[in-house]
Every structure is written in structure tokens, then in C-alpha cells.
Image (spheres, helix red, strand yellow):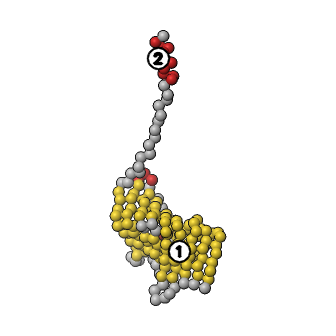
Amino acid sequence: LLMITVVGTWYLIPEPTIIVQKTAQQTDYFIVDFNRKQMDVAGAIASQFSADRVDHYPDEKRAELIQPRAITYSHDTPPWHLRANSGTQWEESNQVTLKGNVIANQDYPDSSRFSRIVTEESQVMLDDEYMETDKLITFTTDRSTTKSIGAQLWLDSGEIRLLKNSTGRYN
């Protein structure tokens, strides 16, 4: 009788609830006031990259950036200045995802000529001077304003491919 009671009670006890807790991602280092300069083969500055703070997450092979800024230099055109509220740099590539108020400026010295690009999120390949987005993007120059949903940009050559729903106003 005791054995039947024990077995019966065992079946009535609910299964234990397994709780899986996701632990906070662990950084292995962080950098405050990060600044990097990359040189070309001739020893001239090819690009600069900085951020107010960088937090590195080794398990995901990425770094989170606060207030990232970049400057890319070309031989034939003025440099591009890029900035955003935040970003993610992926270790296995030279790709940086910029997020929040992404702005790229190019000013021509001794001229009223300029280029300005604004979007909310963009993928940037700094070494290739390439930028792309699938979000709304606005291009403003001294003579025009163009909007598009998505674009591909080659910053060194100035080539732009608008992806869809593009409109423009030209002065």
C-alpha cells in the first residue's frame, strides 16, 4: 500500500520548470576615445576612424561603437566625413554598420560645391570606400536634392545607384 501511495504521489507532482536565462554579453575590453589611422602604400593617410567608445564582444566577433566617425581620403576628390550615433564593426570584414542619423559630407575647398548624404542606417566598407543602405536616403548637393529608398555609393568615384522610388529636384 505504501508503495502504491509513493508511486501515485510521484505521478501527481508537476514536472520541474526549467528556466533558461540569457546572460549579458561579456566584453573582453573597451576603449574610450578610440582613434585609428590607416596609411596607404606611399605612407599617406588613407582613412581615419574614431569613436567615443568601443565595446568588444569576442563571442560574437563584433565591436559596438558609440558616436563613430570616419574620414576616407581619395587622390582626386576631397575627403568624405562620415558619422553616426552608433555602429557595429564586424571582425571578419572591414564592414561597419552605422545606425542613427548617419551623415556623410564632402566639402570642396575654395568653392560652394558640397555633397551631403543622410540616412538612418548604412553598411560601410571603409577600405573599399563603399556605402549602401536599403533605407530612405537623401543626397543633397549645391545644385540638387535626390531621395531614394536604398542606394549603393562608391565614395572614391562618386558613382551612385539609386535602388527604388527615387525622386529628385535640380536647381
Q: Residue furthest right?
A: 165
Quadrant in which the C terminus is drawn: bottom right
Q: Position of residue 98 (x, y in %)?
A: 48, 65
Q: Percent from the top left, x then y, of residue 123?
A: 52, 65
Q: Left or right? Give the position of 66 relative to 134.
A: left
Q: For mark 2, does the 10 Å Cα neighbourhood hold few (<14), some (14 to 19), or many (20 or more) residues?
A: few
* Residue 141, quarter of the rendered image: bottom right
Where does residue 68 sit, x and y in percent of width and height?
A: 42, 67
Residue 102 in the image: x percent, y percent? 49, 69
Q: Which class describes the residues within 10 Å of circle 1: few (<14), some (14-19), or many (20+)?
A: some
Residue at 61% x, 68% y is 149
Secondary structure of the residue carrying tag 1 is strand
The residue mark sitting in front, 2 or 1, is 2
* Element type at mark 2: helix
The residue lying toward the viewer, choosing from 6 and 84, is 6
Look at the picture and state if 168 lies above or below 99: below
User: Does any portion of residue 152 appear in the rendered image?
Assistant: no
Q: Find residue 50 and report its image quarter.
A: bottom left
Marked residue nearer the N-terminal end (2 or 1) = 2
Residue at x-position 44% and y-position 45%:
22
- Viewer can see residue 144: yes
Circle 1 sits on which residue?
Answer: 117
Mark 1 is on which residue type? Ile
Q: Image height check: is 15 above or below 55?
A: above
User: Looking at numbered disc 2 in the image, what kind of residue is underneath it?
Assistant: Val
Residue name at image x 37 percent, y 66 percent: 52
Residue marked by disc 2: 6
